[in-house]
Image (cartoon, rainbow, N blue to C red):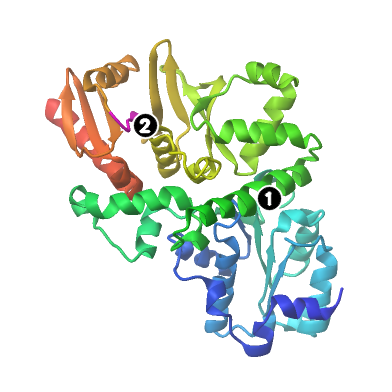
Amino acid sequence: METQILYRFNEWWLNGIIRPELTGKFERENYKEIKKRIEDRQILLLYGLRRVGKTTTMYRLISDLMKVGIKSTNIFYFSFDEASWDIEEVINLYLGNILRMPLSEAGPVYIFLDEIQKAKQWENRIKIFYDLYPNLKFVLSGSASLNIVKGSTETLAGRIFRIKIDPLTFHEFVALKGRTVAFEKMQFAHDILRPLFTEYIEMGGFPELVGETDSWKIRTYIRSIVIDRIIAGDIPQEFGIRDMDLLKRLMEILLQAPGMIVNVDKLASSLGRNRLTISNFISYMEYAFLIKSVSNYRPGTSSASRKLKKVFPYLPAFYTSLLPLTERYDTGKVFENIVLNSVQLEYYYRNGPTEIDFVLKINGRIVPIEVKSGHYDIKEVAKAFNRIGQNSGILITQDSYHIVQSSNVRIFLCPIEVFAMYPDELLNQFLLQGREESIADD
């Protein structure tokens, strides 16, 4: 390995600056939390889906370090994305050919290693350097979560702090488009938010796609740069998959049916594979940020059924990107997917003819959430909420923003784009109103 390769990754050694296009156009909502961790002794690990901004966040941290006076050669960045180099060789080459002084005399040294899961025995190698040299600060990034979580939990226990980098939220997307809507004015912002929301669904929260208007380019980017690389690269490398035909077929089935309740036995039978293989492959796709799952909630118990999980694409754009350009996506399925992503839900409810899209456990309360893209019967929604022992819940719709009472059930109606814009604030408002009514009843 030649020193020239290191210079290719670290232009600031030559000119003392980072090109603006590397640091991104805006600051992510959780960047302040990330920046606070840069001075901690612990290793900082940024993990998440491909192309959501992990590398950009690293470059922003590097830029901020130089702004506060850290010497450029005391900051080292390297990516394992394109080639599998040996970590020890890479770091020793940097220390010997660039830093050129004993670490004990160098002051703080910051080492940024991108796509670390692709380096062999990365956790053991990092542990050695971490334990030997207290002035080394490691910032790592990774995409495939099982390797990352397992290594950081076992080998680096107590030495590492993990922060997940998610795709852009709708709130971040709106800000990037140069628009702002205060939470107090949400109910009047339909005309502003609806077209932006439609655009957000298609581009999927990927920073590089903000501003792109060509649907073909957007879908090609998501398929080739994200989905195909996960299927053809991340999962096979991580789990030693050889049955690529099965992996691709399962991917197509699950991504094209958002909200599908998965019966593993039936899938195994239809695909001609055993149940364990199908179950493992689904788990691999979830670890690789290709899909998400929610479990069936059991009222009156502390557990959820492990059978018949409901599976969604990790992003609605994974579903829309696989559709022909002339085919309209299923609005109801996409809306459910958006709600799932906005609140990070874990449960749905299904028992006989009664089904509730999601069940949220928050602050000791159970909140049923139903999502409707078209016509709905408010009385039927109220009955469903009642069947799990709840006298209040949330109904996500296309255009309503008010509270209704049906029988003894209070239902908070909210437009989908408003919920996606301010999910935490709306949930807090819902919970607060519930507490006030409870106090009034007492």
Q: Position of residue 356 (x, y in %)?
A: 38, 23
Secondary structure character of the magenta stretch overall: strand
Specify the amino acid type for callout 2.
Gly
Task: Give the residue furthest to the top.
Answer: 352
Q: Which residue reaches farthest left?
A: 440
| Of 243 and 311, the residue lying toward us | 243
Q: Which is nearer the eye, 318 or 167?
A: 318
Q: Say whether residue 106 is magenta.
A: no
Label 1: how many residues lie within 10 Å, few (<14), some (14-19) or many (20+)? some
Report helix, strand or loop for mark 1.
helix
Can residue 268 be seen here?
yes
Between residues 378 and 438, which one lies in front from this camera angle? 378
Q: Residue 371 colored magenta?
A: yes
Q: Quadrant of the C terminus?
A: top left
Q: Secondary structure at mark 2?
A: loop
**As displayed, is residue 63 above or below residue 130?**
below
The earlier-in-sequence mark between 2 and 1 is 1
Specify whether 52 is left or right of 373: right
Q: Which residue is mark 1?
A: 229
Q: Is residue 119 above or below residue 343?
A: below
Question: Could you give the CA–CA distance between mark 2 and mark 1, rounded to whole angstroms?
Answer: 40 Å
Q: In the image, residue 222 lies at what x, y percent?
A: 57, 51
* Quadrant containing the N terminus in the rendered view: bottom right
What residue would you read off at disc 2? 364
With 328 as the anchor, is 393 left or right in this view?
left
Query: Which residue shows up at 44% across the image and 59% down it?
Result: 213
Magenta residues, start to end? 367-374
Q: How far from the left and from the top, in percent, is residue 52?
A: 55, 57
Question: On the image, which quarter does residue 23 sit in?
Answer: bottom right
